[in-house]
Amino acid sequence: MFTGIVEEVGRVASLASNCLTIRTHQLMDGLKSGDSIAVNGACLTVVAFGEDTFSVELSPETLRRTSIGALTVGAGVNLERPLAINDRLGGHIVQGHVDGTGRITSRKPEGDCVILRVGSPRRLIPYIVEKGFVAVDGISLTVVKKGASSFTLSVIPYTLENTNLKGKPVGDRVNLEVDIVAKYVESLLSR
């Protein structure tokens, strides 16, 4: 389980068909083989290390469901280690199970913040609510408004400076994870 609070923006060192290697500085301490780590919101398993890199394997499902296969060498990726039992839950409950991808359709300044509009697959829209949360590339963000096929987010300066959203232009794909509680409620009610 994760919180959607990004710890570091790592850089893609290499990407092969089933392996992603990421260069990082802060997260290497204590990281070991078999650990889970959220990479742009996708929960992946650490399988190898270098001096300042770690590698994760990519399943066909991960490549189908996320934007990870489209990354390029040098691209910034949001990194978060799993929540420890004795940590504060500073964001929201995020599983690292990406539901699909969306696209940034607009970026508009509003005071010190940036209003992002994200186009979403219609099948995810029922799980998105105003003032609820959605994880975008693993970042826990509060929804400002919801439309028929998109939603807006108000991103504060700290989040812009400390995540990969700073360099994401209009048109970029982002990983989306909606609230797991909403999905469970729907499943229970559909019985």
Image (spheres, helix red, strand yellow):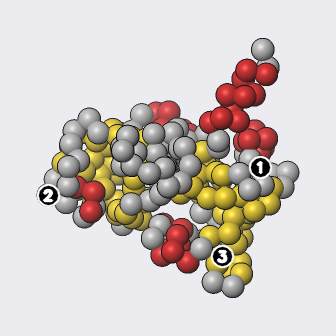
Q: CA distance from mark 3 to mark 1?
A: 19 Å
Q: CA distance from mark 2 to mark 3?
A: 36 Å
What is the total number of numbered labels drawn onto the structure image? 3
| Vertical order, 166 against 77 (above or below) | below
Q: Are marks 2 and 3 in contact (CB under 8 Å)?
A: no
From the viewer's perspective, is the residue at label 2 or at label 1 nearer? 1
Kind of residue sitting beneath label 1:
Val
Q: Position of residue 127 (x, y in %)?
A: 74, 41
Q: Position of residue 12 (x, y in %)?
A: 35, 59
Q: Which residue is mark 3?
A: 114
Residue at screen point 56% across, 49% down: 92
- The quarter of the picture where the N terminus appears is top left
Return the residue found at the far right.
Answer: 148
Q: Position of residue 142 (x, y in %)?
A: 67, 58
Front-lying residue, 43 or 129: 129
| Other residues around mark 1 within 10 Å, as few (<14) / some (14–19) / many (≥20) | some
Instruction: Give residue 52's mark.
Output: none
> Element under label 2?
loop
Task: Say which label, 3 or 1, has the lower sequence index.
Answer: 3
Q: CA distance from mark 2 to mark 1?
A: 43 Å
Q: Are marks 3 and 1 in contact (CB under 8 Å)?
A: no
Instruction: Give residue 51's mark.
Output: 2
From the viewer's perspective, is the residue at label 3 or at label 1 nearer? 1
Residue 77 visible in rendering = yes
Instruction: Give residue 129's mark.
Output: 1
Locate residue 109: give its quadrant. Answer: bottom right
| Vertical order, 101 against 184 (above or below) | below
Residue at screen point 55% across, 77% down: 157
